[in-house]
Structure formats: C-alpha cells, structure tokens
Amino acid sequence: MPKVPFIDHDLCTGCELCVETVPDVFQMEGDVATVIDPEGATEEEITEAIDNCPVEAIVWQE
C-alpha cells in the first residue's frame, strides 16, 4: 500500500502553507487544511509541505 499524506486536524493551525505549496493535494476546509488528492503531486513536493508545516500536523501514513 502506498503512503499518503495525513493531516491531524487537532494540530492544524490553518496557516495554509501546505495549500500554497501543493494546492492539488491540500485545500482549506473551514479553518483547517485537508487532503483532497493524495496523488496530486510528487512525493518530493508533498514531503516539502510536510517538512515546512510549522506545527508538524502533516505526516505520511502507510
């Protein structure tokens, strides 16, 4: 099973950095980000969003 990005909504602060980094994968749903298409960008692009999340709310899930 491939790994997919997962957002912990309890940690997400809604800074929108992940949405700005890979808008084809993440979008805002109210005050928090959500995954709309886990295959919408390369693993490297998604990893960049994960690494740049200021509250570490995004992780890879297998």
Image (cartoon, rainbow, N blue to C red):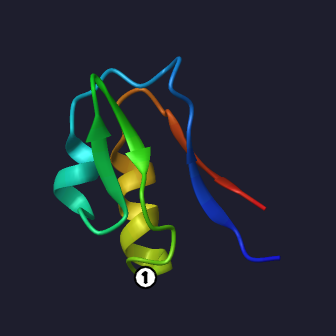
Residue sitting farthest toward the left: 20
Q: Is residue 15 left or right of residue 32?
A: left
Read off the residue under disc 1.
42
Say which element carries label 1: loop
Residue 37 x %, y %? 45, 67
In this view, the residue in front, 60 or 24, is 24
Residue 55 x %, y %? 42, 26
Q: Is residue 33 left or right of residue 60?
A: left
Quadrant location of the C terminus in the rendered image: bottom right
Residue located at (70% from left, 68% from top): 3
Quadrant location of the N terminus in the rendered image: bottom right
Is 28 above or below relative to 25? above
Residue located at (43% from left, 82% from top): 42
Q: Is residue 46 left or right of residue 60?
A: left
Residue located at (49% from left, 20% from top): 11
Is 16 above or below relative to 39? above
As shown in the figure, which amino acid type bears the numbered disc 1?
Thr
**10 Å crowding of disc 1: few (<14), some (14-19), many (20+):** few
Q: Quadrant of residue 23?
A: bottom left
Residue 10 x %, y %? 53, 17
